[in-house]
């Protein structure tokens, strides 16, 4: 995995306009989010569910997101276990 591919994810954000939520997916850095799983974030490449991982030790990996599903990780160009052919998630976060 190219670690730089997973420094960002998409977060569903948006204002309330005329009493209705007008939400859209916006790219955000993993470092801007709390660690763990959240229902309103997804991979920017395959739209699969991801969780935020924080840097815990000085020489460790920087803040990033990782796929929850092994299958998404194997089929996504940003995935840690990518096998070479990019595919969208079979269970995308809407």
Image: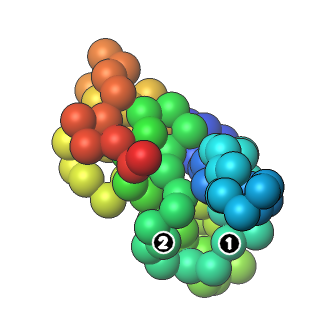
Image position of 71 with respect to 75: above or below: below
How was this image coloured? Answer: rainbow
Q: State the image coordinates of residue 21 (x, y, percent, origin top left).
A: 66, 58
Task: Name the residue tied to disc 2.
Answer: 38
Task: Name the residue tied to disc 1.
Answer: 33
Image position of 30 with respect to 53: above or below: above
| Side (left or right) of 51 relative to 55 | left
Q: Residues within 10 Å of mark 1 (few under 14, many from 20)?
A: some
> Which quadrant of the structure image shows residue 71?
top left
Task: Give yes or no for contact between labels 1 and 2 (Cβ–Cβ under 8 Å).
Answer: yes
Q: Nearer the viewer, mark 1 or mark 2?
A: 2
User: Could you tell which of marks 1 and 2 lies nearer the N-terminus?
Assistant: 1
Residue at 53% x, 68% y is 52
Q: Could you say which is closer to the camera, residue 27 or residue 35?
A: 27
Q: Could you say which is closer to the camera, residue 71 or residue 90?
A: 90
Q: Could you say which is closer to the camera, residue 42 or residue 80?
A: 42
Residue at 45% x, 67% y is 39
Q: Which residue is the extreme one toward the front?
A: 18
| Side (left or right) of 48 relative to 9 | left
The answer to whether residue 10 is visible is yes
Disc 1 is placed on an element classified as: loop
Image position of 86 with respect to 17: above or below: above
The answer to whether residue 29 is visible is no
Q: State the image coordinates of residue 55 (x, y, percent, origin top left).
A: 63, 75
Q: State the image coordinates of residue 85 (x, y, percent, origin top left).
A: 31, 16
């Amino acid at each position: 995995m190219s670690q730089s591919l997973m420094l960002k994810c998409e977060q569903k954000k948006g204002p309330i306009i005329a009493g209705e939520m007008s939400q859209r997916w916006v790219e955000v850095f993993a470092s801007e989010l709390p660690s763990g799983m959240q229902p309103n974030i997804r991979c920017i490449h395959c739209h699969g569910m991801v969780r935020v991982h924080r840097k815990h030790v000085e020489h460790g990996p920087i803040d990033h997101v990782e796929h929850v599903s092994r299958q998404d990780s194997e089929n996504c160009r940003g995935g840690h276990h990518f096998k070479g052919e990019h595919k969208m998630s079979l269970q995308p976060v809407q």
